[in-house]
Image: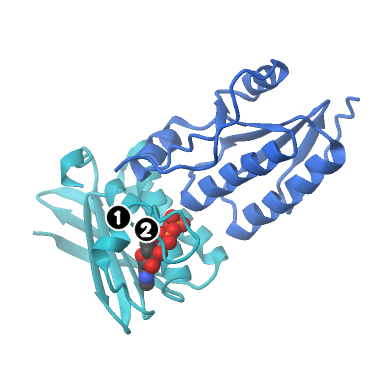
Chain colours: A cyan, B blue
Amino acid sequence: MHTAAGVEACLPIRSDMDLVWVRQHVRQAAARLGFGLVDQTKLVTAASELARNTLVHGGGGQLEVSLVTADGVSGLRLAFSDSGPGIPDLERALSDGYTSGDGLGMGLGGARRLVHDFEVESVPGSGTTVRVTSWVGRPPRPREEV
Amino acid sequence: MSEGFSRPVAGHVPVLRLGDVLLVTLQGDLHDSTAQQLQQDLSETIAHSRVTGVVIDISGVEIVDSFLGRVLAEIAAQAELLAARTVVAGMRPAVAITLVELGLTLPGLRTALTTEAAMELLAQPIVSSRSGGLRQGSP
Ligand SMILES: Nc1ncnc2c1ncn2[C@@H]1O[C@H](COP(=O)(O)OP(=O)(O)OP(=O)(O)O)[C@@H](O)[C@H]1O
Ligand SMILES: [Mg+2]
């Protein structure tokens, strides 16, 4: 039941320089919305993981930042999309420690724990979109849910 | 041998030598390539300068993601093989909370709350046995 208040920004993700912009932009947007320091840090860290996946596994793409509200609560929604190879086995990709490269395999599952809402849309062969949303002032999700 | 001079190792990461210890100060938002460059350069510097300790001050770092976490753990592991101990100092509380939630508890890393405490830690004789690199936390 969100009312998207429109796309606030659209950022390219094509280099590790872009990852720096993504982190800075998300930090500023989250601070402006009123997220506390810990919640800002969690959201920026999740964004960094997801943007790096877009770059490294998806071959580059973009981030769409939107401000959303639901029942008077503001949130920040981040949509990372690429037209890379897609994720064939999402369950496996989300499990801690699974990596198809030489990473630690903590990025995707870890990012999911750091945000309130998390969804992945992935079509093998045509790309991946990961959409996450965090809400100002809402406590973290209980552990069992994640 | 206390040549307290600044010796730039990589990009804009200042590395200072204080006696037998290299003090590395990370600040702001690091590019992946800068972090990787630092990792490479540091092992050479350690081998050259024969320091016995490395302190990495991250009090100016706003986020540590899995990439930077891995770089820190690998720097510590490399230093260990070159007979130097590494202490990561000054992690912000928000960063620590986030790292645990992310699942990166970095068990192989020695930490201290301040660079002074890190220096003291390095001045003590070795007590703990060598611990492995990076392990993931349980889900
Ligand atoms: N945008 C994407 N496109 C295609 N595959 C992806 C994408 N994002 C993640 N994956 C797949 O999911 C796996 C797990 O991702 P995750 O971020 O957890 O680990 P990693 O990126 O391999 O390592 P780490 O993030 O810990 O450095 C990746 O190895 C990759 O196979
Ligand atoms: Mg990743």
Residue on which disc 2 sits: A98
Q: Is residue B127 left or right of residue A95?
A: right
- Please report contact status of discs 1 and 2: CB closer than 8 Å, yes or no: yes
Residue at (82, 42) in percent of width and height: B47
- Where B139 falls versus A66 (above or below)? above
Residue B45 picture quarter: top right
The structure residue drawn at horizontal position 46% and vertical position 76%, both measured from the top left corner, is A59
Q: Is mark 2 within 8 Å of ligand 1?
A: yes
Q: Which residue is mark 1?
A: A95
Q: Residue at x 34, y 50 (%)?
A: A110
Where residue A112 appears, as percent x and y from the top left, is 28, 52
The residue positioned 39% from the left and 79% from the top of the image is: A84
Q: Is residue A61 left or right of residue B4?
A: left
Q: Residues within 10 Å of mark 2 (few under 14, many from 20)?
A: some
Label placed on residue B54: none
Mark 1 — on which chain does it sit?
Answer: A
Is the CB of mark 1 within 8 Å of ligand 1? no
- Return the x and y of residue B90 as percentages of the image width and height: 56, 29
Measure the C-alpha gap from mark 1 to mark 2: 6 Å
User: Which image quadrant for residue A100?
Assistant: bottom left
Kindly identify the amino acid type of the residue bearing the numbered disc 2: Tyr
Q: Amino acid at mark 1?
A: Ser
- Residue A128: horizontal and vertical position, in percent? 31, 74
Residue B4 appears left or right of A23: right
Name the element at disc 2: loop
Q: Are marks 1 and 2 on the same chain?
A: yes
Q: Quadrant of ligand 1?
A: bottom left
Secondary structure under badge 1? Answer: loop
Q: Quadrant of the N terminus of chain A?
A: bottom left
**Residue B106 showing in the rendered view:** yes
